[in-house]
Image (tube, rainbow, N blue to C red):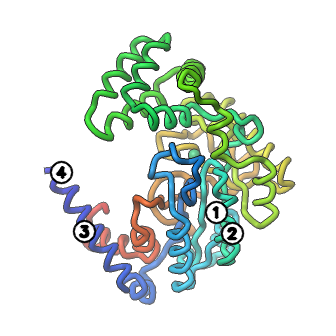
């Protein structure tokens, strides 16, 4: 029954999204149905060779971003950085006339592929940096995982992890998870490592597996910006926001650990760019990935907003420390974003009482 309901919801979503693209969106906008400001969440822009091992849902083609910018212009929606969106909401500007474009983690293609595009369209954006990799060229465990799984498959990765870790029970669960069918295997192995593996142990074991396969952190770090590139982004008008130092699930850290991750990433960025950092994005960003300890730390440190990865649009009443975002990648139709910001999905949710 649940499967049928989900299928129907998907079909309704697709139909509304197509209708939105065919003109319904612009009509509803004229009728005042658009009420919120979208914040687009992306990672890699274009298909740089350094990002070949990263999952498809982290990549958006430059052409698709360009189509979004053109669609925004047709709607009279200004594409801005998060700090400017928040300031505009504070001034009481109509949220439906604004959209913020964000790129998480700090990939090099944000500089090589996205910057020229945004400059050509006179649009603005925010890049949220996980700062450790920029100077050290040491990547997080997740990139080692993506690389080895891309090259050798998830069953190989899980078996190697189980063989090398001192956490024997976790190792056995990883191997069992890797035997699941289809995409569930990789998803479940990643989830276990993300939420249950000991952090130091995960750091050590993933590095060992990568290096045994002939890979090196420095080579994976080529997917990321360097500090000079990040500084150049800032000079050319892109907002640099903080995304912690190590891209850890903040909910797994102590209050002091959370504060350190937020404070140190913001300090590194402002030292390099000369610009105070006022926008933050939670790593992973689902409600269970951060907790209430983040809020006082963010307020004390002068942040005016924090972006989550919870789907939705934002208005004057949205909590500035839990801004909603709309994910975009080449796996997600552009019309889905437009149907959210034009109010088509919101209208359907209200009229049909379905959670689209
Ligand atoms: Zn991230």
| Among numbered discs 4 and 1, the one appearing first in the sequence | 4
| Among numbered discs 3 and 1, the one appearing first in the sequence | 3
Quadrant occupied by the C terminus: bottom left
| Residue under the point 72% across and 34% down | 260
Residue 313 position (above or below residue 103): below
Cα–Cα span, label 3 and label 4: 14 Å
- Left or right of 166? Residue 169 is left
- Left or right of 354? Residue 103 is right
Residue 269 position (above or below residue 215): below
Residue 82 picture quarter: bottom right
Residue 156 picture quarter: top left
Judge whether residue 240 can be spotted in this image: yes
- Asked if disc 4 and disc 1 are in contact, CB closer than 8 Å, the reply is no
Q: Label 2, secondary structure: give it.
A: helix
Label 2 environment density (alpha carbons within 10 Å; few <14, some 14–19, many ≥20)? few
Cα–Cα span, label 3 and label 1: 34 Å
Cα–Cα span, label 4 and label 2: 43 Å
| Among numbered discs 3 and 4, the one appearing first in the sequence | 4
Tag 3 residue: 12
Q: Label 4, secondary structure: give it.
A: helix
Tag 4 residue: 3
**Marks 2, 3: nearer the viewer:** 2
**Marks 4, 1: nearer the viewer:** 1
Tag 1 residue: 113
Label 1 environment density (alpha carbons within 10 Å; few <14, some 14–19, many ≥20)? some
| Among numbered discs 2 and 3, the one appearing first in the sequence | 3
Assess mark 1: CB under 8 A from ligand 1? no
Q: Where residue 321 sits: x, y (%)?
A: 60, 53
């Amino acid at each position: 029954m649940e499967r049928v309901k989900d299928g129907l919801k998907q079909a309704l979503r697709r139909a509304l999204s197509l209708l939105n693209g065919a003109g319904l969106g612009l009509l509803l906008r004229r009728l005042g149905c658009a009420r919120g400001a979208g914040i687009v969440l992306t990672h890699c822009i274009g298909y740089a060779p350094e990002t070949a091992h990263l999952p498809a849902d982290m990549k958006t083609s430059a052409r698709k971003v360009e189509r979004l910018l053109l669609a925004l212009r047709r709607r009279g929606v200004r594409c801005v950085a998060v700090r400017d969106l928040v300031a505009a909401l504070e001034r009481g500007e109509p949220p439906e006339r604004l959209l913020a474009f964000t790129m998480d983690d700090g990939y090099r293609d944000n500089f090589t592929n996205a910057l020229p595009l945004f400059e050509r369209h006179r649009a603005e954006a925010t890049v949220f940096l996980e700062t450790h990799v920029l100077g050290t060229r040491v990547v997080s465990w997740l990139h080692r995982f993506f690389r080895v799984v891309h090259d050798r498959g998830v069953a190989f990765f899980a078996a190697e992890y189980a063989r090398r870790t001192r956490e024997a029970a976790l190792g056995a669960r990883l191997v069992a998870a890797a035997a699941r069918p289809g995409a569930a295997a990789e998803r479940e192995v990643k989830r276990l490592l993300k939420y249950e593996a000991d952090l130091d142990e995960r750091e050590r074991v993933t590095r060992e597996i990568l290096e045994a396969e002939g890979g090196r952190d420095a080579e994976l770090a080529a997917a990321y910006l360097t500090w000079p590139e990040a500084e150049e982004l800032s000079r050319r008008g892109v907002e640099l926001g903080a995304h912690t130092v190590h891209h850890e699930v903040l909910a797994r850290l102590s209050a002091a650990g959370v504060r350190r991750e937020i404070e140190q990433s913001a300090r590194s960025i402002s030292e390099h760019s000369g610009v105070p950092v006022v926008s933050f994005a939670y790593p992973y960003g689902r409600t269970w990935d951060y907790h209430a300890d983040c809020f006082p730390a963010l307020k004390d440190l002068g942040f005016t907003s924090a972006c989550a990865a919870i789907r939705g649009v934002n208005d004057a009443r949205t909590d500035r420390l839990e801004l909603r975002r709309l994910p975009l990648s080449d796996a997600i139709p552009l019309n889905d974003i437009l149907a959210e910001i034009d109010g088509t999905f919101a209208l359907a949710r209200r009229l049909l009482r379905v959670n689209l």
